[in-house]
Image (spheres, rainbow, N blue to C red):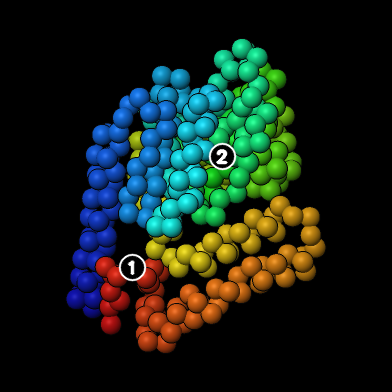
Amino acid sequence: MASHFTRIFHRCSRKTLTNLQLLRQSVRQLSNLNPSDLVVITKQKKLYLIGINRPDKRNCIDDETAAQLRTAFETFENDDEAYAAVLYGKGGNFCSGYDLKEVAKGNFYGIASEHGPMGPTKKLLKKPVVASVNGYAVAGGFELALWCDLRVVEETAVMGFFNRRFGVPLVNGSTVRLPQLIGLSRALDLILTGRPLSAKEAFEMGIATKITACGTGLGNAINLANSLCKFPQECLRADRFSAYHSSYNSQSLEESLRFEYQNASHVLTKESKSGAESFMKGIGRHGKFHLNNPEEKEES
C-alpha cells in the first residue's frame, strides 16, 4: 500500500513540476515579445497564446487592433499543428471593450464590419479557445470573453456590458450567445442593466468555467488549454461543433440528434476505433484520463 501511494505522489510531483516549467517558459516567452505590437502571439507546442497589448488603454480595441486580433486567430485556425488557444490581456486587464474614440470620431467601420468590431467575434472557429479573464472585461471585452469556449476568471475580475451607459449596442454576438449560456432571464438582467458582474456570480451563472486567485489566471488558462490538447482532436472538435449546432440552430430535438451523429460518425472509424483498441490492451483502466501523451505511460 505504501509503495502504491509513493508511486502516486511521485507521478503527481512530476506533473506539477512539468506544469510549473511550462508556465515559467510561457512567462519568459511573453516577456520577450515586441511591446509595440497591438496583438502578440506565442506558440507553445500545440498551444497558441494570443495577447491584446494596449495596456495603457486597458486593452480596448480599435480598428487596427481588431484586424491584428482577427489575423492572429486566422493564423491559429490554419495551423494544423495547433490544437487550442488562450486569449489574454497584457498589463492587468483582459479588455475594456471597443475604443469609443473610434465612435466619437464617427468611425463606424469596425461596428459595421462583417467580422465584428472586436476582431473574430462573428466567426466560429474549428478549435477551442480559453479566455484568461482578469481586471476589466467589460462592454466589447465581455463579448470577446463570451466568444471563447471556456473562461478562467480571476477572483478580482469585473465583467459587464458597461457600454449600456453610452448607447453602444451589442454587435459581437452576445445577444445570441449569452441567452444560450445562462438562459434568457439572466441574460436580459445583464444586457438591460449593464451592471457589473463579479467572478463569483459569473461562476454561479455558468459564465466562468473556473475562478482563480489574482495573478494566476493565465497559468490556469494555459493548463486548461493544454489539457484539451491531449485528447483525440477529431472527436473533440466534432463534439464541440455538434454542441454549438444544437444550441444555435432552430431545429427539433430529433434533427439536432441526427446532426450530432452525422457530424461525428466519421470519428468512429478513426480515433474511436483506435481508442477502443487501446482500452482492450489495458490502457485507461486505472482512472487515467489523458491517454495519448507518449511522455506519460500507463502504470500496470
Q: Residue at x 23, y 60 (%)?
A: 13
Q: Residue at x 63, y 18 (%)?
A: 107
Checking the image for residue 120, the label placed there is: 2
**Quadrant hosting residue 279:** bottom left
Q: How many residues crowd mark 1 within 10 Å: few (<14), some (14–19), many (20+)?
A: few
Q: Quadrant of the C terminus?
A: bottom left
Checking the image for residue 188, the label placed there is: none
Q: Quick check: 176 left or right of 151? A: right
**Quadrant hosting residue 243:** bottom right
For this rendering, which residue is in front, 133 or 252? 252
Do the residues bearing badges 1 and 2 touch, measured as CB atoms within 8 Å? no
Tell me the element at label 1: loop
Residue 232 placement (x, y as % from top left): 45, 68
For this rendering, which residue is in front, 176 or 52? 52
Q: Quadrant of the N terminus?
A: bottom left
Residue 227 placement (x, y as % from top left): 40, 58
Q: Residue at x 19, y 76 (%)?
A: 3
Which amino acid type is marked by label 1? Asn
Q: Quick check: 40 left or right of 126? A: left
Residue with the mark numbered 1: 293
Measure the C-alpha gap from mark 1 to mark 2. Answer: 31 Å
Which amino acid type is marked by label 2? Pro
> Residue extending furthest top?
105
